[in-house]
């Protein structure tokens, strides 16, 4: 990580593995649509989240997803890159597709909070990954420039986010996984 002024990590799949059954989350979100007598735009969780604001369900859908994430953060598993985070000498942040509070819960559960200088979740700024703004907001909170920061993540979405933000990217493993 020489040559960088800051490092930003994705959370789920990078620092921790949230204990979330994403299929169950999708079922709950579909139920939120059905209770409002609104046809969901499909079965995909992220598609339903993206469409929620258009049909007046953003708050309810976000709450349904966040409840699962909060619980899953409390029972999450710490991953090897968490040790790297603790050993780093650079300012560090977390930029996640998970809600900010779930990020904070997971960081606290695994004693990582003191090593993290900025947290940006799905609900911290107006857009979420792969839009570049969440990553750029994290980099700004670390008082770094995008061209002097590194984003470490586990998914193709993370890589696209970094490319769009003009931030160098590194996979946590051999290549993309997950969302």
Image: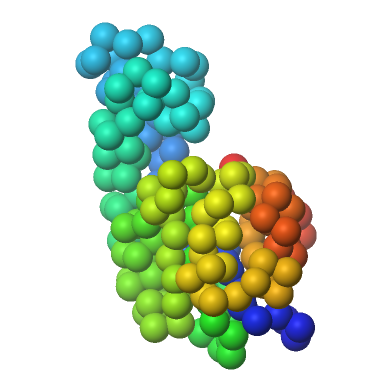
Which quarter of the rendered picture does the C terminus lie within?
Answer: top right
Number of numbered tags placed on the structure image: 0
Colour pattern of the rendering: rainbow
Q: Residue 71, can we see it?
A: yes
Position above or below: 40 against 14: above
**Residue that appears at 61% across and 45% down:** 130
Q: Position of residue 147 (x, y in %)?
A: 73, 69
Q: Where in the figure is residue 171, as x and y percent of width and height? A: 71, 61
Q: Is residue 178 visible?
A: no
Residue closest to the eye, 82 or 38: 38
Picture quarter containing residue 87?
bottom right
Q: Is residue 28 left or right of residue 79?
A: left
**In the image, what residue occupies the spot 76% across and 60% down?**
174
Left or right side of 24 for 136: right
Vertical relation: 169 (above or below) 35: below
Quadrant for the N terminus, please: bottom right
Nearest to the observer: residue 41 or residue 55: 55
Left or right: where 156 falls relative to 87: right
Q: Residue at x 45, y 77 (%)?
A: 116
Quarter of the image holding residue 75? Answer: bottom left
Q: Position of residue 35 (x, y in %)?
A: 23, 16
Return the x and y of residue 71 as percentages of the image width and height.
29, 52
Location of residue 53 with respect to 75 vertically, above or below: above
Residue drawn at x 59%, y 44% as measured from the top left? 131
- Looking at the image, the residue that sits furthest to the left is 35
Q: Nearer the viewer, residue 154 or 146?
A: 146
């Amino acid at each position: 990580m020489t040559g960088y002024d800051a490092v930003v990590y994705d959370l789920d799949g990078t620092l921790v593995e949230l204990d979330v059954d994403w299929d169950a989350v999708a079922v709950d979100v579909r139920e939120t649509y059905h209770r409002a007598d609104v046809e969901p735009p499909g079965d995909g969780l992220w598609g339903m989240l993206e469409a929620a604001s258009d049909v007046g369900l953003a708050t309810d859908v976000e709450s349904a997803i966040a409840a699962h994430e909060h619980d899953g953060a409390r029972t999450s598993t710490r991953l090897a890159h968490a040790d790297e985070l603790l050993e780093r000498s650079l300012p560090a942040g977390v930029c996640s597709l998970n809600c900010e509070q779930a990020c904070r819960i997971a960081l606290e559960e695994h004693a990582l909070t003191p090593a993290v200088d900025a947290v940006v979740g799905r609900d911290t700024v107006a857009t979420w990954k792969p839009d570049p703004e969440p990553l750029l907001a994290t980099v700004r909170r670390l008082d770094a420039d995008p061209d002097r920061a590194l984003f470490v993540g586990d998914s193709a979405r993370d890589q696209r986010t970094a490319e769009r933000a003009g931030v160098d990217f590194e996979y946590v493993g051999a290549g993309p996984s997950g969302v």
